[in-house]
Amino acid sequence: MTEEEAFEDFSKSGIRYRDISLQDQRQDTIHSVAVGCDDNSPKDILVFVHGSPGNWIHYWSYLKDSELLQRYCMIGIDRPGFGRSGNPLPDINLQAKRIIDSLSLLRIPRPKKKYILVGHSYGGPVAARIASLKENKITHLVLLAAALDPEKEELKWYNRLADTKIARLLLPSPWIVSNEEMIPMKDQLKEIEADWKMIRSATYIVQGGKDTLVDPANLEFVRRLFPKGSVKEEIFLPDGDHFLPWNSFPLIKRILLDIAQE
């Protein structure tokens, strides 16, 4: 689905949306799309952080869901280097700070009570890093096939191939940006590993047993490194793959509705 098709579908469904591009002090852009944020009644805030490669449209099914719209002001972002956001920023820590800065600039009502971050794949450590930063407002963290354990992150043959001059000439830009994120990821995860203990958000984790991109052992890593009692629900899907936002939509929607009803 293209962005134009997504916007057209919103309009046909009567969903009011805001197409937002904000520049920070560095004059770099973070693009996002907000839905359900213009109602008079206060709502909780739900932010989606996509994987690599990707863009906000990966969460389109959630952004148009009528039950979620009743309860949440929802925001889908384009991470740096993807969609209509600005220059690539292949650094988990710097991305987290860039994104939280851009969210603070959004002209949306304050959350009714909760501020939820959902992160998939590479978006998982970015979302978790945001939740570990001082003075963050994140109350709930939902991690889907999140790559967090540095010891489980190893470059594949195709990462090395994609880093050659010939591949850079042939590959689409999002794949080049994605590969640039993958190459330093192991070292970056090591650098911020000690900070996971700073997370105070109620955390929900979903991991597939047949995920070939993120090692299912990341579940054990979260058990060891996240603060005791912070993980409120841990779901292991023996036959689940990496593409949880699409293939496990009913389950993830249930988690989000449960959080709304707390």
Image (cartoon, grey):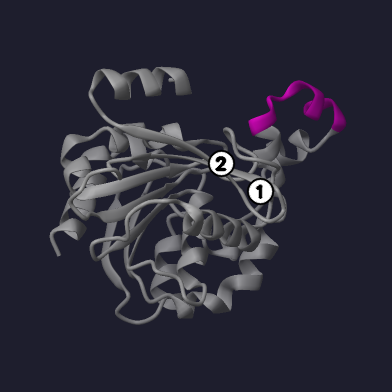
Check residue 70 for magenta coloring: no
Check residue 166 for magenta coloring: yes
Residue 241 shows in this picture: yes
Q: Which residues are magenta?
A: 165-174
Q: Residues within 10 Å of mark 1 (few under 14, many from 20)?
A: some
Against 190, residue 48 (above or below) is above
Q: Amino acid at mark 1?
A: Met
Residue that appears at 61% across and 58% down: 92
Q: Position of residue 191 (x, y in %)?
A: 66, 72
SS at badge 1: helix
Q: Give the quarter of the figure containing the C terminus.
A: bottom left
Q: Residue 64 sits in which quadrant?
A: top left
* Badge 2 or badge 1: first in the primary sequence: 2
Q: Give the quarter of the figure containing the N terminus.
A: top left
Against 9, residue 225 (above or below) is below
Do the residues bearing badges 2 and 1 touch, measured as CB atoms within 8 Å? yes
Q: Position of residue 152 (x, y in %)?
A: 57, 59
Q: Residues within 10 Å of mark 2 (few under 14, many from 20)?
A: some
Question: Toward the viewer: 226 or 14?
Answer: 14
- The circle drawn on residue 182 is 1
Q: Residue furthest right?
A: 165
Q: Residue 75 sits in which quadrant?
A: top left
Q: Residue furthest left?
A: 261
Q: Amino acid at mark 2?
A: Ser
**Residue ID for mark 2:** 52
